[in-house]
Image: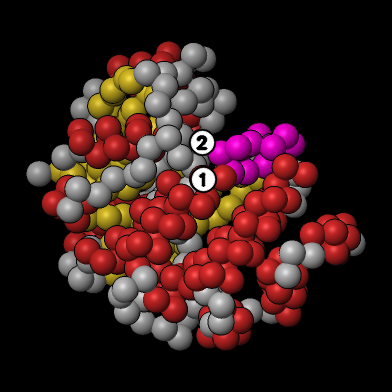
Amino acid sequence: MVNLSCIVPIYNSEKYLSKCLDSLTNQTMKNYEVILVDDGSTDNSKKIVDEYIKLYPDKFKYFYQKNMGQASARNLGLKKAEGEYIFFVDSDDYLELDACQKVYECANENDYDILSFELEEELEDGTKKSSNYYKFTDVSDDKKYILCETSSVNKIIRKSILIENNLQFVENYIYEDLELIPRLILYTKKVCFIEDKLYHYVIHNNSTMRQKEYNSKLQNIFFVMNSLKNSLENTEYKEELEYLYIEHLLHGAVLRYLDYEEGYSEIIKISEIMRKNFPKWKKNKYFQIQNIKYKIFCILAYSKKINLLKRILKK
């Protein structure tokens, strides 16, 4: 049996792909596979992949699908994977060369269902950004898992958890990580964190979250948050769910919507959602420990003070 499957969705990644594949090829771990899913690339990505497959035919498995999005590509990779654990890797990122060995050995020795680790954020020019992944420390591991970084790339997940519970990424939506990753806690027995920075997450200016023109896909956040609510509201994680709404809707989504006039009506919608579902959100214990700037922003967003927020952010 393969110990670890690295699933890499690829879409027009020629600029970054070789660096990603080099980091996967040169891993210190022995028993792992790399599942490459080409999501209908129109650039030279396939040519680059062919070179690696020729050199390492026992390491790489290649699959092609018409352009259906990253979530669909990951789901296809999951169906094809043979590993005990799954490691999702984005094609424009790269790993430390001992990443696979470290995370698998730790998860296997301790029988973890999910093992999370730190990632290092990088701008395209190579500038490093500090990660705030371990913001919550004085909570149980399961609650910490829900509250911390919801990315799929900074963790390995026992494949049986996903397969046996028919769990996969929601397709045709952005925020697909946020929709799935916190919910996994309902199906796991043991999660853990290690403080090693093993994954390099490269931030691009042309991503959906950073485009200069309004993208209607930003409205997907409402579907995603409602999905989390349906999964977590009647569990022991209700206060954690409330904080996810504060962090990803009242704070994160409002920050994005402020860049576009088309987003102003969505800010009003967010305020109403919070008023209806979490009227006492200001008393949330996780919100209470945030810094004053964060608190003021959320309170102003809730009060629909759009012009004041824009003036403050320009300073």
Is 124 placed left or right of 3 in the picture?
right
Q: Amino acid at mark 1?
A: Asn
Q: Can residue 37 be seen here?
A: yes
* Image spot of residue 254 (x, y percent): 67, 57
What residue does disc 1 label? 220
Magenta region includes residue 206: yes
Q: Nearer the viewer, residue 18 or 40?
A: 40
Res 184 → quadrant: bottom left
Q: Secondary structure at mark 2?
A: loop
Magenta region includes residue 222: no
* Image spot of residue 247 (x, y percent): 57, 66
Is 284 placed left or right of 74 in the picture?
right
What residue does disc 2 label? 92
Q: Which residues are magenta?
A: 205-218
In the image, farthest residue toward the left: 1
In the picture, the quarter occupied by the C terminus is bottom right
Within-10-Å neighbours for mark 1: few <14, some 14–19, many 20+: some
Within-10-Å neighbours for mark 2: few <14, some 14–19, many 20+: many
Q: Image point 32% across, 20% down: which residue?
A: 64
